[in-house]
Image (spheres, rainbow, N blue to C red):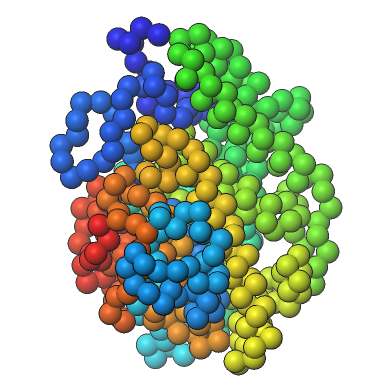
Amino acid sequence: MNPSKKLSRRTVLRSMGGVAVSLPWLEAMGPVTAWSNEPAAPGKTVPNRMAFIYVPNGKNMDDWTPKAEGTDFELPAILQPLASVKDKLLVLSGLTADKARAHGDGGGDHARALASFLTGAQARKTDGTDIRVGVSVDQIAASRIGEKTRLASLEIGCEQGAMAGNCDSGYSCVYSSTMSWRSATQPLPKEVNPKLVFERLFASAPDANRAKRDARRKSILDFVSQDSKDLTGRLGRNDVRKLDEYFSAIRDIELRIERAEKLPPIKAPDYAAPAGIPAAYDEHIRLMCDLVVLAFQADVTRVVSFVLANEGSNKPYPFIDVPEGHHDLSHHGGDDAKKAKIRQINLFHTKQLAYLLEKLKSTPEGDGSLLDHAMVAYGSGNSDGNAHNHDNLPILVAGGGCGTLKTGRHIRYTNETPLNNLWVSMLNRMEVDLTQIGDSTGGLLHLS
């Protein structure tokens, strides 16, 4: 390729029918440099990304919290699946979601836990339409940097949730099932169907084009094949290989979605997989993880929120020999047998996080990986599910944040340190200059 004719980082492949496929970073787009506070060097700057992953009902905290601080810490039982990415982790103890507490509103800890997680705001206790909480950190980021990508943000999950009605002690169901809030009164429902997420990422006019492809059994890649052939002729060997790998990943997800739609739903107590969603919960989660990787790789969006299961979820886990409901077990009352089953659920969730982080780590970009150029926050708005406490939350952040995070450490903060202080610091690393959101008191120290 003529080096004077570089590809734009925002190049997309298009079909006559309106399908659009964004591209990963290619050498033909020019050099890549990591983000820093210093003026950018000539060339292309690697974008920083942020993802927020939520799991419900708290953790077995003894199995979560490392005993040692600093770099010389061992991964406790339910963090063991993260061993391969330990050097990319920040385990953060002592953070608190104060606005998840009652403050005179009585029961409803599950609803408040999710509603306040990214907002740092107190949810109005109502099961009517007069809902109110606050703007979530992901949507603050989307409003500031969203114009740089095709999608300002992506909101996904793996459990359907009602947007009305009473789900927790007089709190609307919307609070228990929604993590992202565009405004104090505007929740952003998550999409739980991988096929629809895929269409949103890769189709300009998803409804019409999906019907055409389904009728003709054609892949999105078939629709942009001519454009991709024209592009391939302009690329060097390394870029052609990278493009082949990227297209293979897209096609693999298409095939998995098609296969999932043909499988019968899993038969389990109190839970039936919705139509169009993989019958196996782990496959559902991993499909969503793969879509997050593709979205970041193609720079379709830089902001993702991902709710693995709704707060207060009573989903059973028979596939790991835990047929009882998660929420019921979280009220273990100190029973060792119940705590052992909660440990198994916690471990399952950590394994899914490990899958995502390892995929990000194995996806090269510039002189590093997607994980080097991302911040993945994982945790819950409840600490011990039995006590319904909201201090000393189970929180970790993975990824290098484009060189702005010093990872491979366990940091213990003074108890009652606002969780939103972490979100302020992550926003600053996305070049969003804010000093206060929700109940934050400033940025979080010692991250770099």
Asked if one can make out residue 293 in the rendered structure from this viewpoint, the answer is yes
Residue sitting farthest toward the front: 72
Q: How many marks?
A: 0
* Image quarter (top left, top right, bottom left or bottom right) of the N terminus: top left
Q: Is residue 59 left or right of residue 303?
A: right
Query: Is residue 304 depicted above or below 90 in this figure?
Result: above
Asked if one can make out residue 184 in the rendered structure from this viewpoint, the answer is no
Give the x, y percent position of residue 160: 64, 61
In front here: 8 or 2?
A: 2
In front here: 364 or 198?
A: 364
Q: Tell me the residue at 41%/59% (across/down).
A: 89
* Image quarter (top left, top right, bottom left or bottom right) of the C terminus: bottom left
Q: Tell me the residue at 55%/72% (across/down).
A: 77
Query: Is residue 421 depicted above or below 34 in this figure?
Result: below
Q: Is residue 66 left or right of residue 195?
A: left
Q: Is residue 411 left or right of residue 363?
A: left
Residue sitting farthest toward the left: 39
Q: Tell me the residue at 50%/81% (across/down).
A: 62
